[in-house]
Image: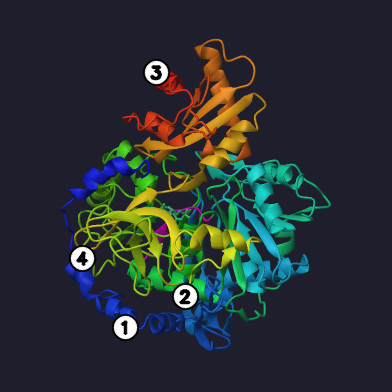
Amino acid sequence: MSATSPTLANLLHEQRRFDPPPELAANAIATASIYEEAARDRLAFWAAQAERLTWATPWEQVLDWSDAPFARWFVGGRLNAAVNCLDRHVAAGYGGKVAFYWEGEPGDTRVITYAELTAMVCQAANALTELGVTAGDRVMIYMPMIPETVVAMLACARIGAVHSVVFGGFSAEALAGRTNDAQARLIITADGGFRRGAAHALKPAVDDACAQCPQVDKVLVVRRTGQDIPWNDGRDIWWHDIVDRQPSTHEAQAFDAEHPLYIMYTSGTTAKPKGILHTTGGYLTGVTATHRMVFDLHEDTDLYWCGADIGWVTGHSYIVYGPLANRATSFMYEGTPDTPAKDRWWQMIEKYRVSILYTAPTTIRTFMKWGEEWPAKHDLSSLRVLGSVGEPINPEAWIWYRTHIGGNRCPIVDTWWQTETGSIMITPLPGVTSTKPGAAMRAFPGITVDVVDNDGNPVPNGSGGYLVITEPWPSMLRGIWGDPQRYIDTYWSRFPGKYFAGDGAKRDEDGDIWLLGRVDDVMNVSGHRISTTEVEHALVSHPKVAEAAVVGTHDPVTGQAIVAFVTVKGSVPADEAQGAAFAAELRAHVAKEIGPIAKPRDILITADLPKTRSGKIMRRLLRDIADHRELGDTTTLLDPGVVQQIAAQLAGSG
Ligand code: 6R9
């Protein structure tokens, strides 16, 4: 079904169970009755969750599904997302409470209270207004992991502007494509950020992107590293020049529950990323409810840390909107986990007494590779709950996480969700669920999922199939920016009336759900979604490449790794050294076109690619070759010899 399937056999034999710690269960935010409550009346359950937010105007109807699959939640309600994350807490007397403990990679620190964050966001909102940004305008954000990134997002939300954060690891090309698709006129960036012990620049990529985005007339630049950067006087403005002189109060207007909050671009099965649109009321309801219950957040005593980058949806929902709406105190870190040493994370968990940690399997596997001696040097006894997100977590990593980070004490919540779902959909609840290593277990209360066969019929327990969501949910995407038809085609057409997630899943004998990876041409590299087509397009845009086929293969650390098969125009590299140099050139080219995360791990320069008689490249075969699997049916091949040649070449390259 996918490159992660080799682990399926192991999963089926997984018998271990881990009950919730009694003390945690006794004080848990969510108890078993929540499932019954939600099952009795799903809409009433979500309405009760929405009540926890502060609304300027109450809604008249919980859900309007009359124009399915275009949903409207909390119809008629009005609210402001930033006010829900900030002002209301200050007004309730929590202004002095810390919102973020932040640590830069070089070791510099900041402590920001709710009152301070509110003032910063008000100033930034006033600055955006001075720059002519109004409700509905799109604003790109291309930033390192610094508090100003949160401030920029909330300032947009406060004035009803739609932010679109692009991960700082993406290239100028990627930023330009997204900026043009969103038709944004303002980009907020920084001179750079600290990673791997050095200042890396961001601003030059923005300059390159702007060369392709004529509509961008202002670039707002935060000074983080102090490095020298190119400057365009008519266009560029220092954040501190315009934001610092603004009043620190701002009268926030309430927006319709369905007012667009943000666009997050994510890879689909084609080369063009999709702009996933989220709106205000339902999204905030979903992230707030899940953040509180899935992590058992006791906001006045917990210290929560989500190790994701804000440039991914996980950062949006579980660094910014969920935690702040819940009045949580969070820790936030700028840099890489091995700077200055491989125990940086554990050292910070000990120092700040972090109690909830949320990270990705690929990160856990990297820590496993580095060795348990690094966490063992530190007191991690403050930890209470551990989360995982981004890809299926293999039982080995799950057990390692529980043993070496969680001290055999902390429950692990393996949370399945997507950019499109906005918030966690399938997960254990830490005070309720008896967990199984590697299983996401069951749908969050108020969420209805199923595993279906090719015809859309639910599979019996013990069988696998396609994961679907059967009813609309508050934080669901409201569409693809500028392309309503693609929204219908991608998600609602494969199984009419059901949301098709693109993931394979299995229900075990107890009915619990195990995720099996993507069933489409989307790869998952270190928890990042990258489409095979996207990388193929980047490769063939190199003048010397004739054709390219890209597949995802199993990788022990990154989950999947990208393998590219390439045929060249003109003469092929004469020897191994030339071949290696050419492969390096192609990898750099892909990094430039998309970003370093999309660089193929292996590039094979081949004489030809296996094709069907109708000329379709047989990626399935290439995947089998890359995974060193028994080759499937080759009878439809135009030239079966090609496969043998490629397989021999791959064996030769180690
Ligand atoms: C939040 C996020 C979504 C895809 C999704 C699936 C994979 C995420 C997972 C998981 C198994 C988990 N995925 N969490 N697979 N178990 N706990 O990652 O969003 O970047 O849009 O990726 O990631 O394949 O379809 P996004």
Indicate which disc, 1 or 2, sits on the residue closer to the N terminus. Answer: 1
Residue 268 in the image: above or below residue 482: above
Residue 492 percent across, percent down from the top left: 49, 63
Q: Which residues are magenta?
A: 303-310
Indicate which disc, 1 or 3, sits on the residue closer to the N terminus. Answer: 1
Q: Is residue 600 visible?
A: yes
Mark 2 Cα shell of 10 Å, populated few (<14), some (14-19), many (≥20): many
- Residue 40's tag is 1
Mark 3 Cα shell of 10 Å, populated few (<14), some (14-19), many (≥20): few
Mark 1 Cα shell of 10 Å, populated few (<14), some (14-19), many (≥20): few
The residue tagged with tag 1: helix, strand or loop?
helix
| Mark 4 or 3: the one toward you | 3
The foreground one among 20 and 260 is: 260
The foreground one among 488 and 299 is: 488
Indicate which disc, 2 or 3, sits on the residue closer to the N terminus. Answer: 2
User: Do callouts 4 and 3 mark residues in contact (Cβ within 8 Å)?
Assistant: no
Q: CA distance from mark 2 to mark 4?
A: 26 Å
The foreground one among 548 and 278 is: 548
The residue tagged with tag 2: helix, strand or loop?
helix
Residue picked out by circle 3 = 648
